Image (cartoon, rainbow, N blue to C red):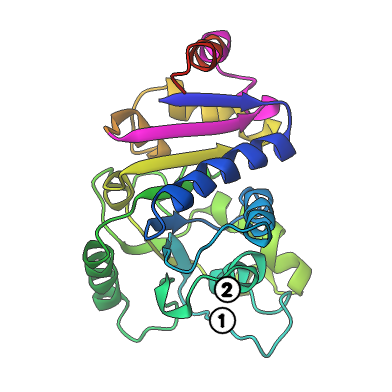
C-alpha cells in the first residue's frame, strides 16, 4: 500500500489526477471506476484541465460506484435541484471531457427492478474486462460507496439502506442547498459492493480534511472490520494508493514511516 501525503487538498487532488491520467495514457481503453462526493471534485477539475491539454478519454469506459434509488439525471432542471449522482458526474466531469456517452455506466436510480439491475451491473463490469482503476473516497463512518457499517466485506452490487450519518452528511453536502427537507431525501441507494471494489485491478483512495483523520487511521491502521467497510483495503492484493492531505493523515500512528517510504521510492526510482 502506497500512502502519499501532500500539504493540502489542492496538492492531493493534483497527485490523484496524475495517477488517473497515467492510467489513461498507458492504457487508452482502460476501465475506470469513479466516485462522487465533495472530495473528488478537485481531482476531476484537474482531469478536465489535463484533457484540455491533450489527455484523451475517447476510449475510456467508466463505471460509477453508486446512485440514490428514486432519482435520476434530469438536465432540464438546475444542478442544485437535480441531486442525482448521475447529474453530479455530468456536471463535474463527463460534460467536460471526450468520454463517449455509451461508455458511461451509472447505477439506474429509477429502475423498476433494482435487484435485477444490480446483477446486470455486475455482469457489465465483467463484460468490460473488470475495473483497471477504482477511485474511492471514504465516508465519515468509514464506508466505501454506500456500503454502510455492517455491510459484508464480500458484498456485490446491491441495494443499501443509508445510515443516519450518511443521510446527515449527504443532506448538508447536496440536499440542503436545494431546499429539500431532510426527511424527503432518498434513504436507499444502489452501490457497488466491497467485494466488487476489491475485484478492481488497482484502487486509488483519496481523503481530505481533519474531519476524516480519525476514520482514515481506522481504515489503514485499525482492525479489518465490517463496521469500517473501507478497512477491507488492508486485504487488497492489487496495487493500492492512498492519497491524503496533511490534515486527513494527521491521526496516522505510522505517518513518518509512510513519508519515509515515499521518499525512498522517489530517491531510488521505485515509485
In reply to whether residue 248 is colored magenta, the answer given is: yes
Location of residue 34 in the rendering, given as x and y in whole percent from the top left corner: 48, 57
From the image, which quarter does the N terminus lie in? top left
Task: Determine which quarter of the picture holds residue 36.
Answer: bottom right
- Rendering coords of residue 262 (x, y %): 53, 17
Q: Residue at x 37, y 56 (%)?
A: 30
Would residue 7 appear left or right of 186 to someone viewing this image? right
Q: Secondary structure at mark 2?
A: loop
Residue 223 highlighted magenta (yes or no): no
Disc 1 and disc 2 in contact, CB within 8 angstroms? yes
Q: What residue would you read off at disc 2? A: 84
Residue 146 in the image: state x and y as whole percent: 44, 55
Other-residue count near label 1 (Cα within 10 Å), few / some / many at <14 / 14–19 / ≥20: some
Residue nearest the observer in this picture, 151 or 121: 121
Instruction: Identify the magenta region.
Output: 238-259
Q: Which residue is mark 1?
A: 73
Amino acid at each position: 500500500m502506497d500512502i502519499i501525503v501532500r500539504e493540502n487538498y489542492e496538492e492531493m487532488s493534483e497527485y490523484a489526477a496524475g495517477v488517473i491520467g497515467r492510467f489513461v495514457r498507458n492504457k487508452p481503453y482502460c476501465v475506470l471506476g469513479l466516485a462522487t462526493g465533495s472530495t473528488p471534485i478537485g481531482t476531476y477539475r484537474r482531469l478536465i484541465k489535463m484533457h484540455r491539454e491533450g489527455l484523451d478519454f475517447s476510449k475510456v469506459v467508466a463505471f460509477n460506484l453508486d446512485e440514490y434509488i428514486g432519482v435520476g439525471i434530469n438536465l432540464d432542471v438546475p444542478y442544485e435541484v437535480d441531486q442525482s449522482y448521475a447529474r453530479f458526474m455530468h456536471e463535474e466531469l463527463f460534460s467536460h471531457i471526450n468520454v463517449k456517452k455509451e461508455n458511461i455506466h451509472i447505477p439506474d436510480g429509477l429502475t423498476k427492478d433494482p435487484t435485477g439491475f444490480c446483477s446486470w451491473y455486475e455482469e457489465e463490469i465483467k463484460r468490460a474486462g473488470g475495473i483497471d482503476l477504482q477511485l474511492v473516497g471514504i465516508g465519515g463512518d468509514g464506508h466505501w460507496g454506500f456500503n454502510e457499517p455492517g455491510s459484508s466485506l464480500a458484498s456485490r452490487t446491491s441495494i443499501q439502506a443509508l445510515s443516519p450519518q450518511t443521510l446527515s452528511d449527504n443532506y448538508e453536502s447536496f440536499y440542503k442547498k436545494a431546499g429539500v427537507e431532510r426527511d424527503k431525501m432518498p434513504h436507499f441507494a444502489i452501490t457497488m459492493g466491497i467485494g466488487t471494489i476489491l475485484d478492481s485491478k488497482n484502487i486509488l483512495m483519496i481523503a481530505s480534511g481533519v474531519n476524516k483523520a480519525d476514520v482514515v487511521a481506522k481504515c489503514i491502521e485499525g482492525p479489518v472490520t465490517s463496521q469500517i467497510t473501507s478497512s477491507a483495503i488492508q486485504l487488497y492484493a492489487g496495487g493500492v494508493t492512498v492519497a491524503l492531505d496533511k490534515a486527513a493523515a494527521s491521526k496516522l500512528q505510522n505517518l513518518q514511516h509512510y513519508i519515509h517510504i515515499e521518499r525512498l521510492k522517489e530517491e531510488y526510482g521505485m515509485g
